[in-house]
Image (cartoon, grey):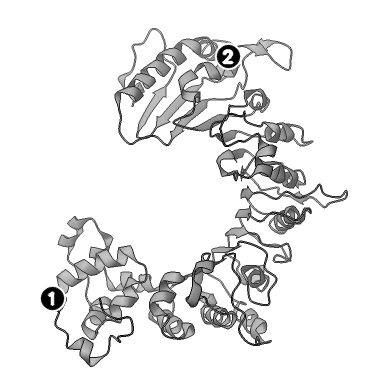
Amino acid sequence: MLSMNTSYSDPVFQRVHVPIHKLNADILLHVFGFCRDIQPVSVWSLSYTCGRWRRLVLEHPSLSVSHVKYSILALCMHIADIAERWTRVAVDRSTLRRLGSLPPFDWLTTWLSRSGTDRPLDIIIDLHDVGQWYHTTPTRDDMYHILLVVCHHAHRWRSFSYLLGEAAIKTGGPFDTNAIDRLKESLTDMPRLQWICVAQERFQLDDGITPDHFLRLMQPKAALHLRRMPLANISDRALSTQWNVHHLSYRISIPCRSTAVEQVWVRSVLRMCSSVRTLRLTGWSDGADDPPGVRRAVLRQLRHLEVAPNSSMMKVLSFVDMPCLTALTLKARLIPERDEVMGETAWDRQMQSAYSDTFLDRLLLRPDALPLSQLVLYLPFLSVPWHSIVHFKTLETISIVKPKQDSFWSICPSNLFALYERSKQDDMDIGWCLPRLHNLTLRETGGNDSVNHAVAALFRRLEVEMKELFKARWEDAHGKDARIISLDFDIIMARSKIKIRYLDRKKSEDPQDRL
């Protein structure tokens, strides 16, 4: 191994005779292909090794078609492909460890210059693990210079990510009071920006430029094509005007100090993103109830909601109108294992408690009926809340995701009684629940990749029993006075899948029915 203090341009280094210098260009490009796929920064390292490698990386013509047989995209490097690699600019622990011998803004400027002048850029400033950097932790001034350099190319941004971990950036000396104004001036035109992610582990109040502070400098009118915005622990002051985003994600990961401030943040962000169509809410905040008179957020275009089913998110949604919501995903597996969270969700480490259907019940009590047609439930070691589900009569598809070790599989299909047994409906007649339901998907997680005898036996048992249990419902669905839709089943386990469909008794069983 060469010393990290040795310069690649040192004459002593260039006179060292090592076997790799005897390799021809094709073999070197083959090796470079593997290196490039392992580390995103490898293109930089290769071009700085020696003049010959630099010419190969930047100027070599495209490889012949015969190299495609290796099934590695790196073997099909064209000059344009190499330039595309330079357009993914990453400032993280890996790049700073390799390139930090120069001031950050020097190598970053060189990197950006090699990306061309008109290619769209994907900027990634990833400091999520900054607390583990020790001696290489960037200072506040370093961060300012890094942001200023990348913001100089903001007109070329296609995506921008700024992630900050829990540890604060070193403050260093006096901060330039004009830093904020300079950054703001460089963010006035971002016509290509489609995706922006700003996230921090906690709300930081230092005088550095945190993700929260940085987002305040941006204006929606400067990014007219921005459509996706993942946020984490961003305060309500970060978005002061309406943003035309279609896909929004918000995560709370910091416990509140006996207030509901994080929940207020979420609702304020939702009010500023009223055009959102897909919304993802995760995390937890043990805040108190909101005072009366809280302004509601109205999401008239929201179609798909993915949410962690806990009391914190229920309080958030209680002040959000979603008149056109059609798809709901409850991800119980995202609930953190903390005592205060488990108490609200009937969750425990012994995996013996029942699923808390309070979340679905509260949705049923809303003054505006949700026109749900699709429901997805991630339920690790939790029972299926059918007594709540059956009240969403507009449902057309249901997907239930369960771990392989869950007892759900051993008692299935008897735990689907709500669908194969007639019951008293709202009109007091005896009939079938969920008359519009046409597909039920049962998906297993944590299974192996091979199809063994146990899986085959389970499939055979499920197919036989489900056809027997659902025979009456199927016959009613295909009768002359049918009031319900025929229900299909998809059971997915690892790489195996079985489809269970209605078959007319007069027809023989279709061999294509089982996949």
Tell me what residue is drawn at x 59 percent, y 39 percent: 332
The secondary structure type at the circle numbered 1 is: helix
Q: Quadrant of the C terminus?
A: top left
Mark 1, other Cα within 10 Å: few <14 / some 14–19 / many ≥20: few
Label 2 or label 1, whichever lies nearer to me, is: 1
Spatial distance from mark 2 to mark 1, Cα to Cα?
78 Å
- Image position of 505 (left or right of 396): left
- Quadrant position of residue 418: top right
Residue 141 or 420: which is nearer the viewer?
141
Q: Dot 2 surroundings within 10 Å: few (below 14), some, or many (20 or more)?
A: some
**Residue 433, disc:** none
Kind of residue indicated by mark 2:
Ala
- What residue is shown with label 1? 19
Q: Residue type at mark 1: give it.
A: Pro
Res. 480 in view: yes
| Residue 391 placement (x, y as % from top left) | 68, 25
Could you say where residue 14 lies in the image, as x and y percent from the top left?
20, 87
Q: Which residue ends up furthest to the bottom in the rendered image? A: 11
Q: Earlier in the sequence, mark 2 or mark 1?
A: 1
| Location of residue 110 with respect to 373 vertically, above or below | below
> What residue is drawn where x is 30% and y is 67%?
36
| Extreme-top residue of the structure | 506
Residue positioned 38% across, 76% down in the render: 98
Seen in the picture, residue 372 relative to 474 is either above or below; the reply is below
Q: Position of residue 317 (x, y in %)?
A: 72, 45
Residue plotted at (68% across, 57% down): 273
Compared with 397, 325 (above or below) is below
Viewer can see residue 412: no
Q: Residue 482, which numbered label?
A: 2
x and y, in percent, of residue 466 in the image:
46, 15
Residue 492 in which image quadrant:
top left
Quadrant hosting residue 215? bottom right
